Each structure stands twice: as C-alpha cells, then as structure tokens.
Image: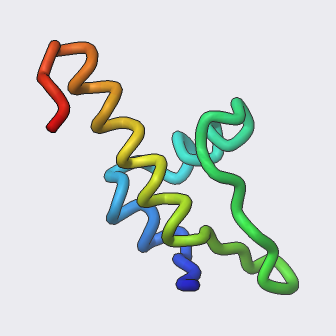
C-alpha cells in the first residue's frame, strides 16, 4: 500500500486543496488517514479508484461504449 501526501493527490487529480477537502466533507472523495500529529495522507488505490469512477461517469455521460 502506498500513501500519498496532499501534493501528490493534487498532482494526480489536478484539484486545489480547498476543492479536495470540500469533496471529502461532501463524502464524494476518499477520506485521508491520520499519519500522526497534523500529517495526513491518502491511500493511492482509493485515489486511483476515484479517478476510474470519474472516467466511467464521463464515458456514460458522453455515450462512449465501455470495452
């Protein structure tokens, strides 16, 4: 398992910090895990899965056949 810090999550998703936390609060983005003190991180596989869901949503919205 790989843990990503905020900067890496932002790089993968191209979302701003405030947007990431807004999505976390809304329950539409994976919650970070506590790494100690004020440090948090996200599980890489959960971020990957979230991105895959976004791709599927895009494909469904645009009528792109899955294959």
Q: Nearer the viewer, residue 43 or 6?
A: 43
Look at the image and tell me in which quarter the C terminus lies. Answer: top left
Total marks placed: 0
Image location (x, y in percent) of residue 39: 74, 79
Q: Residue at x 59, y 43 (%)?
A: 29
Query: Residue at (45%, 71%) from the top-left corner?
Result: 7
Residue 31 picture location, percent across and down: 71, 54
Q: Which image quadrant is residue 9 in? A: bottom left
- Asked if residue 39 is positioned above or below residue 44 in the image, the reply reads below
Q: Residue furthest front?
A: 67
Residue positioned 55% across, 76% down in the render: 5
Q: Nearer the viewer, residue 26 or 39?
A: 26
> Residue 28 falls in which quadrant of the image?
top right
| Residue 15 point in image, percent of width and height | 40, 48
Whether residue 64 sits left or right of residue 45 in the image: it is left
Residue 59 or 17: which is nearer the viewer?
A: 59
Quadrant housing the N terminus: bottom right
User: How far across and how far down the image is residue 53, in percent?
Assistant: 41, 39
Q: Residue at x 76, y 69 (%)?
A: 33
């Amino acid at each position: 398992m790989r843990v990503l810090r905020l900067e890496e999550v932002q790089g993968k998703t191209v979302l701003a910090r405030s947007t990431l936390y807004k999505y976390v609060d809304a329950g539409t983005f994976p919650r970070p895990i506590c790494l100690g003190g004020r440090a948090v991180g996200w599980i890489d596989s959960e971020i990957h899965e979230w991105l895959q869901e976004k791709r599927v949503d895009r494909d469904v919205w645009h009528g792109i056949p899955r294959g």
